[in-house]
Amino acid sequence: MSAIIPSTLVALLHGPDQPGLVARVSGWIFERGGNILHADQHRDMEAGVFFQRVEWVPPTSADAGTMAQEFEVMGRSLGMNTHVADRTRRARVALFVSKFDHCFHDLLLRWKTGDYAADFVVVVSNHPDLADAARGYGVPFHHLPVTPATKSEAEARQLALLRELKVDLVVMARYMQVLSAEFLRSAPPVINIHHSFLPAFAGGKPYHQAYERGVKLIGATAHYATAVLDDGPIIQQDVARVNHRQEVQDLVRVGRDLERLVLAQAVRVHLENRVLVYGKRTVVFE
């Protein structure tokens, strides 16, 4: 008989700062027999907003789902926006990709080696090129072509597929399509990798833009997708130095390494419930 894995609950809270919040949250968990594993908090001094992430193990006699609901009620009573997740539940992830395959392979290799406590359940692409590679990883592949004339129909099919597979997160691994506001309203959270250090060089061909400006740093940015192109809350960024001797193709080569690492880190912290979205910003608890 396999051992029963105890639930581990993670709460993310934010709201107006007030005295005693940390004590009230920890006291609530203690009074119900929970054991806190990690707790971290942050205060935005200018806005007067309190942020907290707390991770705890409920007592074996407790129902984790009920405890999560009760905690959310308690958090709201303190004026906090509150969300609780069960870390023992494996998230279901969909990978959206076009032809560039470096982020695609990197994420699936990390998943195969156990880096993510999640299940990659489908690869969706507007091109057929990566079908064999996806199946080689054991992940179903769906080719859904997108043209200006068929965009609405294609997105409707994508949403139906996401609902059918109960997908919790969509990762755009260099998926070279702009998702519509209608799609994003109905989809689960979407993480995108943009190949520049946003807000610089948004939109198409950022490496060409960077080369033309003669920048000395190039970067990559992982962010949540919103209806405004390349404007969503930023999760992770990194940069590399470049110089006048490097051509556009050199910037692309250097940038691809950044893209792989930045996207992988963003997916990890999201799946571990470490990202708290606040307006156009994020607080990422490490």
Image: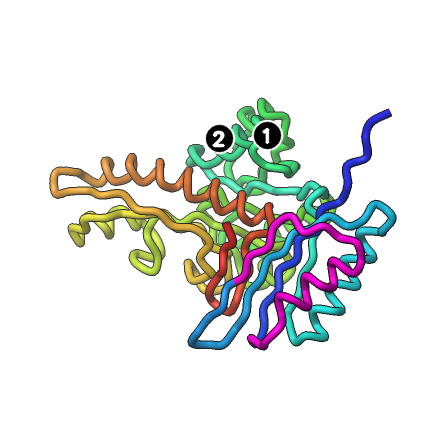
Q: Which residue is mark 1?
A: 114
Residue pictured at 52% horizontal, 67% vertical: 278
Q: Residues within 10 Å of mark 2 (few under 14, many from 20)?
A: some
Report the amino acid beneath label 2.
Answer: His
Disc 1 residue crowd, few under 14, some 14–19, many 20+, Cα 10 Å: few
Task: Tell me the magenta residue range.
Answer: 17-41
Q: Is residue 58 left or right of residue 277?
A: right
Q: Which of the two residues, 33 or 250, is positioned nearer the viewer here?
A: 33
Quarter assignment of residue 138: top right
Magenta span contains residue 250 = no
Q: Secondary structure at mark 2?
A: helix
- Residue at 61%, 33% in the rendered image: 141
Q: Is the residue 16 above or below the residue 215 in the image?
A: below
Residue 93 location, quadrant: top right
The answer to whether any part of residue 153 appears in the image is: yes
> Is 31 included in the stretch rendered in magenta?
yes
Q: Is residue 32 left or right of residue 235?
A: right
Counting residues from the N terminus, which is met first, the one under dot 1 or under dot 2?
Answer: 2
Query: Which sits in the foreground, 23 or 258?
Result: 23
Q: CA distance from mark 1 to mark 2?
A: 14 Å
Query: Can residue 157 be seen here?
Result: no
For the N terminus, the image quarter is: top right
Residue at the location (67% across, 44% down)?
A: 91
- Give the residue at the far top of this rendering: 136
The residue tagged 2 is 105
**Residue 154 relative to residue 266: left or right:** right
Q: Which residue shows up at 56% across the image and 49% down it?
A: 270
- Type of residue at label 1? Gly
- From the top left corner, tell me how far across and down residue 114 is, in percent: 59, 30
Colour logic = rainbow
Give residue 197's position: percent from left, percent from top: 32, 53
